[in-house]
Image (tube, helix red, strand yellow):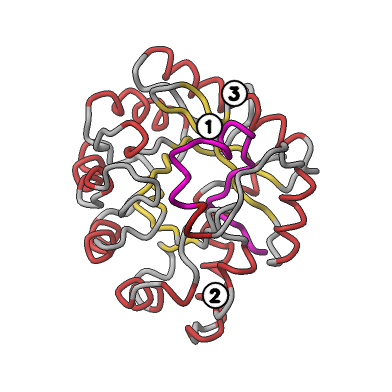
Amino acid sequence: MIVDAWGQHPTLRHAQHEMFESLRRWNRQAVPTEELPVAETLRAMDGGGVDRMLISAWHGPGGALISNDEVARFVGESSGRLVGVGSANLARPMEAVREVRRCAGELGFKAIRVLPWLWKLPPTDRLFYPVYAACCDLGLPFCTQIGHTGPLMPSEVGRPIYLDQVALDFPELVIVAGHIGYPWTEEAVAVATKHRNVYIDTSAYTVKRYPSQLVRYLKTNGRQKVLFGSNYPMIAPATALKGLDDLELDDETTALFLGGNAVRVYRLGEEA
């Protein structure tokens, strides 16, 4: 099984947002003018041999670019292949806690994701802490972004070392840090090595762009701590996985990286 740990099925307001202009130029993508059908995302998954993809809501200070209810609708149209990841409004702590609970109980989501750069806040900011506590209570992993930002937003809040303090304050919180952490990949590896419940996913990077520090970690003591992710639709799964054989991973490591770790971390076998 291949599980894509970081994707989005974008709404039109998400896809058209001006902050993604720099990414569109980099990818030579035109501004979308129509809503993307779920069938198109499923076809992209098929192209990369991906069985399941975690798709996330996006909530920032300006509101929801992809709402939790929209994610739930996309998941419902996917015949079980898409897995919901919720988000929350940090500016209203109790509302955020109630929404995290709704995501888990009513919508059946498997994780919560909040992007520090979208809020221009480091993950040690007090506004994150009610969300962490709710995730701990519900057994939901907390997903976030580490490393520099593609959109023209501040990168400093993506320093992986911030997660060291979060993991110390919430040792039972499962944290999945996406986007590798470049140019601070060594920091990301150090934090994931130190803390039992901190993981790294490779979203937003193709295999040929994986930093050597991450590849070394993946092949050694990090074989159970690194998850495959694409950041679809920015990168199609097939493109993200191209050249995987060149890493010369053994069969067990390959299976863990492509799906086994995600199944365990997100408890994907517990839907029934």
Q: Residue 36: percent from the left, percent from the top?
A: 72, 41
**Amino acid type of the residue tagged 3 in the rendering:** Gly
Tell me the kind of residue under disc 1. Answer: Gly
The total of numbered circles placed on residues is 3
Image point (45%, 62%), residue name = 202
Q: Judge whether residue 16 is colored magenta.
A: yes
Element type at marker 3? helix
- CA separation, marks 1 and 2? 28 Å
- The amino acid pointed to by label 2 is Thr
Q: Earlier in the sequence, mark 1 or mark 2?
A: 1
User: Which residue shows up at 47% across the image and 83% down it?
Assistant: 247
Residue occupied by mark 3: 105
Which residues are the magenta region?
Answer: 1-23
Tell me the residue that label 1 is attached to.
86
The residue mark sitting in front, 3 or 1, is: 1
In the image, 186: left or right of 55? left
Q: CA distance from mark 3 to mark 1?
A: 12 Å
Marking on residue 254: 2
Around disc 1, counting alpha carbons within 10 Å, would you say few (fewer than 14), some (14 to 19), or many (20 or more)?
A: many
- Percent across and percent down for residue 18 are 47, 37
Q: Position of residue 127 (x, y in %)?
A: 28, 23
Q: Quadrant of the N terminus?
A: bottom right
